[in-house]
């Protein structure tokens, strides 16, 4: 057996992000920026008002109340047709450019407007710049907006749109194919025949990929014969950036996946000192990474979390490959036998009011017992030879919606 770290390092050493691609800004949410973006425009492009009210000369409010002559109106999307001077005001709507000569705005709620007389009474004194958003206050030409490596979210896209950027260079989201293998698997909903089981792994892995932000492609179910297996892996390598398979990575007599992948790819078959998910395969068909995950449902999910998800994050251009671990208080003893492996126990729990995690062990720790994995909010990492009692600290990997 090899260590977990050795297996992880091997996988990560053989994957890399693809060349950048230019896409419309609207399609870039969640992707990693591939090049620095420097502003070429000013935001705001002109001095404008943050409030509906009256544009004035601030010095006119030294003594209040004061009455000013209203000499015009400026709506958003238009500009004043004349300046204002001392003793004058101009009605102004949020976002409209400040009239020449005005240096402050009084919000409409602190005024009394006499439309018939074209005057406004100002109730409060205001300083220069009151409710005025200055030109270039947010962005100026030459500003570095975002550096390469930034994960683009809603705010980033809004800023880029505000300076007129329509396309960006990004690392494309990996397109990942998923295949299940095995004569025993059924995926068409018909009644089971003796020896058959329903395929849950493919849907589980497709969902994990989508939850992690990758593009998931269903490659279907391959039967236990070399032509079918070779065809589906070649199709995956031709149409996807990576391929995940479940089943056929152990040493069984009918594990044709190994025979096929050794012939068409450059693979390494591993026995890793962990439980579950001890058998694992990784390699390349051409330059397309192939992840051979074990067939037991829980093993498949744990193997995805430990190996495939970090590698695919690296292929996405992200710099945080692994989920963050944290310490938790175990409410139950996490007993285990010594077997030379690190155990990943399915546990449930979460943070208390102070942010400290508390977890308890779930019933059903077999690698075939998917219901416990579905209830789990974390994997507890229990090294070989370590006895964790109730009330002791244990390192955990938060998963699902609680995982980072």
Image: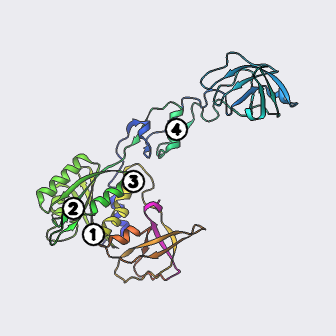
Left or right of 89: which side holds 347?
Answer: left
Residue identifier under label 1 = 296
Q: Residue at horizontal 71%, vertical 25%?
A: 91
Which residues, given as a range, are shown in magenta?
390-404
Q: Residue at horizontal 19%, vertical 71%?
A: 251
Q: Of marks 4 and 3, which one's residue comes earlier in the chain? A: 4
Q: Residue at horizontal 60%, vertical 34%?
A: 139
Q: Is residue 28 visible?
A: yes
Residue identifier under label 3 = 313
Q: Is residue 12 visible?
A: no
Image position of 356 with respect to 206: above or below: below
Q: Of marks 4 and 2, which one's residue comes earlier in the chain? A: 4
Image location (x, y in percent) of residue 235: 19, 49
Q: Residue at horizontal 59%, vertical 31%?
A: 43
- Decide whether residue 393 is among the magenta residues: yes
Image location (x, y in percent) of residue 317: 41, 48
Q: Are marks 2 and 1 in contact (CB under 8 Å)?
A: no
Residue 211 position by quadrant: bottom left
Image location (x, y in percent) of residue 173: 37, 47
Image location (x, y in percent) of residue 256: 15, 64
Residue identifier under label 4 = 158
Q: CA distance from mark 4 to mark 1?
A: 44 Å
Which of 203/120 is in front?
120
């Amino acid at each position: 057996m090899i260590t977990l770290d050795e297996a992880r390092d091997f996988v990560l050493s053989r994957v890399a992000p693809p060349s950048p691609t230019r896409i419309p800004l609207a399609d870039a949410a969640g992707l990693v920026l591939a090049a620095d973006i420097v502003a070429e425009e000013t935001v705001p492009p002109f001095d404008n008002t943050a409030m509906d009210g009256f544009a004035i000369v601030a010095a006119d409010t030294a003594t209040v109340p004061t009455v000013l002559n209203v000499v015009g109106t400026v709506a958003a999307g238009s500009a004043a047709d004349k300046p204002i001077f001392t003793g004058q005001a101009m009605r102004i709507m949020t976002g409209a450019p400040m009239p020449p000569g005005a240096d402050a705005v009084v919000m409409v709620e602190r005024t009394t407007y006499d439309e018939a007389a074209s005057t406004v009474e100002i109730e409060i004194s205001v300083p220069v710049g009151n409710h005025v958003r200055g030109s270039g206050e947010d962005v100026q030409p030459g500003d570095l907006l975002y550096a390469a490596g930034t994960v683009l979210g809603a705010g980033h896209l809004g800023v880029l749109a505000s300076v007129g950027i329509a396309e960006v260079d990004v690392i494309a989201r990996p397109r990942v194919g998923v295949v299940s293998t095995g004569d025993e698997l059924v995926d068409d909903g018909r009644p089971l025949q003796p020896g058959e089981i329903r395929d849950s792994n493919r849907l589980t892995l497709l969902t994990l990929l989508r939850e992690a932000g990758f593009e998931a492609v269903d490659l279907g179910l391959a039967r236990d014969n070399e032509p079918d297996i070779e065809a589906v892996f070649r199709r995956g390598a031709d149409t996807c950036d990576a391929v995940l398979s479940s089943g056929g990575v152990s040493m069984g007599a009918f594990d044709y996946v190994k025979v096929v992948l050794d012939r068409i790819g450059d693979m390494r078959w591993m026995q890793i000192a962990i439980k579950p998910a001890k058998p694992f395969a990784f390699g390349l068909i051409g330059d397309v990474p192939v992840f051979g995950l074990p067939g037991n449902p829980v093993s498949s999910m744990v193997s995805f979390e430990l190996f495939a998800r970090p590698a695919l994050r690296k292929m996405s251009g992200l710099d945080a490959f692994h989920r963050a671990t944290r310490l938790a208080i175990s409410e139950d003893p996490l007993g285990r036998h010594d077997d030379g492996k690190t155990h990943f126990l399915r546990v449930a729990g979460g943070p208390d009011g102070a942010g400290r995690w508390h977890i308890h062990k779930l019933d059903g720790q077999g690698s075939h017992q998917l219901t416990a994995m579905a209830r789990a909010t974390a994997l507890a990492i229990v090294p070989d030879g370590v006895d964790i009692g109730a009330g002791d600290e244990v390192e955990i990997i938060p998963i699902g919606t609680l995982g980072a």
